[in-house]
Image (cartoon, helix red, strand yellow):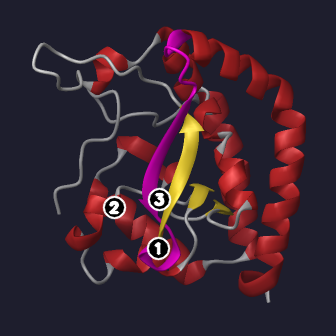
Amino acid sequence: MYKTFIKRLIDIVAALLGLLVLSPIFVVVFVGLYIANDKKPFFFQLRPGKGGKLFKIIKFKTMNDKKDLNGALLPDAMRLTKVGVFVRKTSLDEIPQLLNVLLGEMSLVGPRPLLPEYLPLYSTEQNKRHNVKPGVTGWAQVNGRNAIGWSEKFELDVWYVNNLSFALDVKILLLTIKKVIKKDGISKSGEATMSRFEG
């Protein structure tokens, strides 16, 4: 009952309330990133959802599009703007994903949606992370986020899929608030973002 109906109902209500309550912050961040990123405050990217079905995720854009002399994008750490650093550390870049939740492409809680090119690299066990909708936050996020390795991250994702419940989702949401306040696990040691998954 919870997995098939109540979870979706909670997602809709919470996403609507979240967008309403956070709308002042949404506007301020939008303006700041609009100025810092050459009028490009949003970041859109295809991500695999439930069953591996692709959807377009929306986040606040924390990096600019500066390139080197060969036309290749500069490393992530060099493209992070000052506003972007603040937005990422406070996890405000995730706010627009509430729109993905309303559209039914994501849930408030679930494994984080990763890059489409990772799909053929997963083992059968790791691929179970796609048995549920991806989430704005998840079990891996409250147990290390980007500061843990891929294998551990996927083990945590699959554990969540196998143990999904209302109580677990509430626990994850409460731990997420704590993590955001403490700014834990934003990136892997020595890197601005999580390193790429190579299989």
Looking at the image, residue 196 sits to the left or right of residue 45; the answer is left
Compared to residue 158, the image places residue 71 above or below, namely above
- SS at mark 3 in the image: loop
The answer to if 8 sits in the magenta stretch is: no
Residue at the image position 23 percent from the left and 21 percent from the top: 74
Please report whichever mark, 1 or 2, sits nearer to the chain's N-terminal start. Answer: 1
Residue underneath mark 2 = 116
Q: Mark 3 points at which residue?
A: 113
Work out whether 118 lies above or below 137: below
Q: Give the mark toward the camera: 3 or 1.
A: 1
Distance of label 3 from label 2 (alpha carbons) = 9 Å
Q: In which quarter of the image is the N terminus?
A: bottom right
Tell me the CA gap for discs 3 and 1. 11 Å
Query: Earlier along the polypeptide chain: callout 3 or callout 1?
Result: 1
What residue sits 52% from the left and 55% below the top?
Answer: 56
**Amino acid type, label 2:** Pro
The kind of residue tagged 1 is Lys
Percent across and percent down for residue 132 are: 56, 77
Residue 60: name its quadrant.
Answer: top right
Residue 53 tag number? 1
- Between the residue at mark 1 and the residue at mark 2, the CA separation in whole angstroms equals 9 Å
Is mark 3 in CB contact (under 8 Å) with mark 1? no
Residue 197 appears in the rendering: yes
Label of residue 150 in the image: none
Q: Could you say which is closer to the camera, residue 183 or residue 8? A: 8
For the point 34% across and 18% down, the residue is: 79
Local crowd size for mark 2, using a 10 Å CA cut-off: few (<14), some (14–19), many (≥20): some
Range of magenta residues: 36-53
